Each structure stands twice: as structure tokens, then as C-alpha cells.
Image: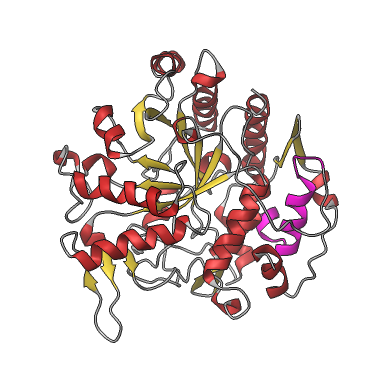
Amino acid sequence: MNTVNKLLEAYNSNIELNIDEWTLKRQFVSGMKKWIANIVPHELLSRSVKDAVNSLMTLNQDGNFYKTFPDNVLTPDYGDNWGTSANYIELNNRSVAEMVGNTCKNGIISSIKMLPAIPPSAKSWANCIILSQIFPNIYGDGFNKPANEENSIYGIKLNGGYSRNIINFDIKDKITPNEQFRAFNDLANFHGLKTGFRTVISADQIKVVQKDNTDITFDWNNKEHFDLFLNSHIELINLGFEAVFIDSAKHIGGYDMGNYTGVGALPSYEQMQYIIHEIRSRTGKTHLSFVGEKSTGDFMRYKNLGLSTGTGYIDSNDFEAIKNKAIDYKYSKEYSPGIEVSNDNDEGGKSYEERLKRISNAIFGWEYPSDKLASFMQTEDLFPLRYDTNTHHLMMCNPSYSTDGSPDSHFINLFAFDDGREYNKKVGEIFSHAINL
């Protein structure tokens, strides 16, 4: 049985699918591509897993409706170098997890529910969802904390399985954590999306779990630790992820350390080069995309490292600069610079109009569609957050905005209300013009 059907049965649903009328009333259509817009996330997150799968089937872009979810789902195929022109949209799967009292759980299930509202890939380039959290965070994994108490997503544990913020461990006897990730990836691929995850490489931000002993700090010069890092990432790629966003990638090998804001030693250039090569080699997947945070300036350095693209080089408010850089790199399909609509350090303050302009520039900044550079967005760029929080705060802290201790209240209060709906509609209109180019 495929993992999507296993997930449905784990939630006590039958596996026969039905046309979803709720989706039909809210769908945006651009050619054969369909998704939901003009919504607020609560409308998605309050639905059931079965509703989400019905919705994705109703939006199926090949025009067929399958009565059960297909066994063989292929990733959208844009060749080996798709990563140089993709739109990467980071979904903070911890922030949309279920907040029940002081616990935080089931972020992968919430991420599945969000998929129908993510625009599918265009004719000429891919859209790729990047999940913010996979591994347990060091302090308070599985719990929310007061709004200003640190509970950083940038501090992770290896050798301790997957985060309790993300996996539904209540159903692990019916569908394993690995199968839950596989189900997410199959559903995303079915919707016309690629997927990836954020990873951390600063040694003091990584703990290694030791059975029956205290966790120890990661050491890049410890072969067991090195192999653990490599094998953990290979396992995720084998579950269907196709992109890895590497935090602090600019500083690998001690480069530009005057601007390094991470904590602890970084891998050497040769170590990271080996890791990227071995992930591609051992998985047999030559099309993987490795994205470097702030990997700007010496592009040959990052190309030779094995990266596909990097963030933060071009001002996304400057359409002509984006277009000219796209022309400069039109024949560079192994590595190209990227444009940030916003990044994980975004502390808010941008108007809706500026965000929409930055999205439009990032998507349309080219002479020909085939020239397009990669772009990087956050959840907030598609679904505006409430007025008193921002992307970076939700990476550093894990508050519940529930007023009654229920998940539903958190989903309602995390995001903007009517103005967020109108903004999401305008984002949908931008993507609808681009998706058939």
C-alpha cells in the first residue's frame, strides 16, 4: 500500500477519493495548473487529512480524477539543473504545527494540508517547498513556549530521529515517521511541486544524541559525527526530498568569517564538497539541488562546491538589475545567483505592496523565461503573519497564539485576517500570469 493510503487509514479514513466542492469554489486556474488562493491558512489547517487529499486530487493538473491515490508518483521533471531557476518557498512547518496546550506536534500533517494553496510549478521552472524543520530542536522539542522565550529551530539534534514538532508519533504504529515524510513528498509531487529541507552546519548548533548518556556537541573532525551527518541527509533524500537549503553556506571553509553569525566550527570546503558529492552519488540522484545561504560573490567557489544556487545577491526591488543578471547567466545552468523576496532573518516591516513587487520582480525578471534565476520566499510572502510576529521570530521562538489552548485558535491567530486573504489573492494572480510561461 502506498504511503498516502496508509496515512488515510491511520486517520481512520477510507482510501476512496471524491471531488471536493470546497476546493472547486476556491481554485485558481491557469491552463492545466490549479491551486487554491484568496484564502487564509486557517481554512486549510482546520480541514481533515482526507479533505486535503481530496483537494489535491480535485486540483490534479493532468485532468484525470483517480478514485484512489496512485502508487507511482513522479517528481516534476525539469532536468538535472532545475535548481538554478526554481522558486524556493520555505514553509515553517513548526509554526503551523498543532498547538495543544503547551505541546507542539504534527507539523508534517499541517504541511500536507497547506499544499493545495501552494502554486504548482510553471512550464519553464519548478516551485520547490523547503521545510524549515526535520530534526529535533535542542531545547523544547515537542513544546511551545512563551512568545519571547528562545526555542530556536537553528539548534538541532542528530541521532535522535525526527522532531516531535513535525511527526505524528501518535500514529507511528500505523505509519512510520519515514512514511509520513514520503507521503508528504508524494502529495507535493502529485501537486506539481518539488520538495527540500533546511539543514544546519554550525557545529555548536548541533548535538549528537547518545543512548543512555548526555548529548554531546557535534564535531566535524569526528568521523562518526561526520558519517552521521552524511547518512542522515542521504536517508531524507531517499524519502523523496530533492533539495537541501544549507544555512551559513557562504562561510564553509572559513570564507568571509567576519560576517559569520552562526555558532561553532564549520565544515572545511573539502568536507562539504565531499558531502554534496556523496549524497548525489549514493542516492543515484544527479538532479538534486543544493542551495547556499548568502553564497554570493565568488560564484566559481560555490559552483565547484556543488551548489546549484545561492541567496541574497541581487536587490529584489530592482527589476532591471534582476533582468540583466538573468541575461548574464542565461547559459550558466550549473550554478547561478538567486533573488531573495525574503529570507529566514526577515523581521517584518515590509508593506504588502513591497512584498508583491518583490515576488513579481523575482518571477518576471528575465528577457526570456528560460533565463529566469532562482528565487527565495518564506511562508509570510504567500500568507501574511499577524501584526506582532515575523518570520525570524518564528524561527527563533515557538509561541502558540491559541487563546483557548486549541490548535484551531492558533491557526486562526497566527496569520493576518481579511487583509491577508486579499493579499493571498494578489499573490495568486501574480503566479497565474507566470505559470504557463
Classify 329 as above or below 23.
above
Is residue 225 among what the camera can see?
Answer: yes
Classify 94 as above or below 430.
below
Along the horizontal axis of the image, is 15 left or right of 169?
right
Residue nearer the viewer, 202 or 330 = 330
| Residue found 39% across the figure and 35% down from its top | 308
Along the horizontal axis of the image, is 221 left or right of 67?
left
Classify 115 as above or below 209.
above
Does the magenta-highlighted stretch encompass residue 29? no
Task: Tell me the quadrant of the picture where the N terminus can be found.
Answer: bottom right
| Residue found 43% across the figure and 37% down from its top | 342
The answer to which quarter of the image holds residue 152 is bottom left
Residue nearer the viewer, 44 or 180 = 180
Classify 409 as above or below 30.
below
Question: What segment carries the magenta color?
Answer: 42-63
The x, y position of residue 382, in whole percent, is 57, 40
The x, y position of residue 340, in whole percent, is 42, 33
The answer to which quarter of the image holds residue 174 is bottom right
